[in-house]
Image: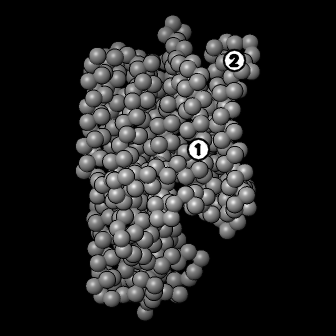
Amino acid sequence: MKSGKYLIFVFVFFVILCFFSRNIPLFWDVVFYAREGYLLYEKGLSNLINPFDAAFPFYSLYLDLAWKLFGRTLHVSHFVMLPFTLWMVWEYYKLSKMILQERMMIFALLLLVFDPVIVTQIILIAYDIILLCFFLFSLNALLRNKRKLYSFGLFLLILSNIRGIIWVGALFIFDIIRELCICEKKSFKFRYLFNYFPAGVALIIWKLWHYKITGWYMMPPENKIVWAFAKGMMILRQFIYIIKVNFDNGRVFLWIGLFAGLIYYFRRKEIKNKLFNELLLALLIIYAFSSLFLMLFMNPISHRYFLPVLVVLSICVAYVLQFIKSNKVRIITGLFFISMLFAGNFWLYPEKYGNGWDTSLKCLSYFEIRDKMYDYINENKINPLETGTLFPLYENIRYTDLVDKDFQLTNMEGKSLKDFNYVVQSNISNAFSENEINELNNNWLKVVEFRKGQVYIKLFKKL
């Protein structure tokens, strides 16, 4: 019953977090889908097919419905995402409770609360929380052998985002290996394939309809480079980045803790736990399948792409901590892991390597100094059309702040610095090359600079 009280506290925490983050603008990839939601809001379902994206617009449709019912504001957008946050927490709680002792539930929940990627994505009302919610719902249903619920979860997952296809594929492989190896069945039951039928049919129908309207399946021709196949050293680079994002934000210590615990676990045959074996298998398959898929393409690797890995890892770490007999040592070790996750919010890499700004709390400093820069540009009558910048600084405030006015700097992607009289540069953007940053700092006039926390934003003028 104690764990139920802990769950209530976590629910309350995320409700309070939602209230205090209600004015945070939309950020990073969320803006793309909010822009799509705005088109639906303004022009109706005739814009259901996005000419720049292949995914079914679940998130955009949800925002469109919420805005039509309650108004197109940041407050509404934050609060309508709260049900998915609480649902995700509930599914995480159920999954943890399947294998953990009662005394370890508080630790598992704290790992969730202090996870930089998850908390930041919640604050930024990212669609990835919906994806994670549907994934945990599906995994819970599968582990409980509730096949109809599992089928429904897969249906939701595959329609929530393109990445849902990867996670459905991982769950399919896990389902087969689980049945044959852990459940010790002689063969995978053919009827289980029908669990994947609704999701598969929905995906095929959507893709065929999308192709009929746009003439392409996965990526528009102008963006094919993003999903082009990686070759040679690029595959190695992607592999290194996959390791980096999974070890980032202090999570490297959780992996070390898990490996140490597994050494003890596999040496002690008498403590084998079938459910833990299943969860561990799920962790390995999801990590391996996602990695193999993503490293074959040019698309930049993000922490968000491994959200299922991160949450299952936390539960597995909580489980192996049960092996520590000393209550004092166990608590100290658990607090160490939690503190490392929190500190991971503020790990900052040199600009040439990039940072996961949308997956750590250090990004929150950006919005205040962004507003100061916009005010400075307006007050000094600097033409935004002559002011270049890169992602995510060029987004229109109509879509980031959900206001009924426009202010937007010019996207300089594919252009030269020399094409602009002014350039706004910030370390919040990973898109500026090292040469461009050096050129601006050494050969341009720095007009003004604003700093807060670990984030800066600068306005340069061409000499």
The residue that disc 1 covers is 159
Residue 50 percent coordinates (x, y):
59, 60
Query: Which residue type carries mark 1?
Result: Leu
**Dot 2 lies on which element?**
helix
In the image, is 245 to the left or to the right of 115?
A: right
Which one is nearer the viewer's eye here, 58 or 310? 58
Picture quarter containing residue 315? top left
Picture quarter containing residue 454? bottom left
405 is higher (above) or lower (below) than 190: below
The residue carrying pointer 1 sits among few (fewer than 14), some (14 to 19) or many (20 or more) residues within 10 Å by Cα, namely many
The residue that disc 2 covers is 180
Residue 409 percent coordinates (x, y):
43, 77
Mark positioned earlier in the residue sequence (1 or 2): 1
84 is higher (above) or lower (below) than 379: above
Q: Quadrant of the N terminus?
A: top left
157 is higher (above) or lower (below) than 430: above
Residue at the image position 48 percent from the left and 58 percent from the top? 37
Residue 348 percent coordinates (x, y):
39, 56
Is residue 336 shown to the viewer in this render?
no
415 is higher (above) or lower (below) than 302: below
Residue at the image position 49 percent from the left and 72 percent from the top? 390
In the image, is 187 to the left or to the right of 275?
A: right
Residue at the image position 71 percent from the left and 26 percent from the top? 193
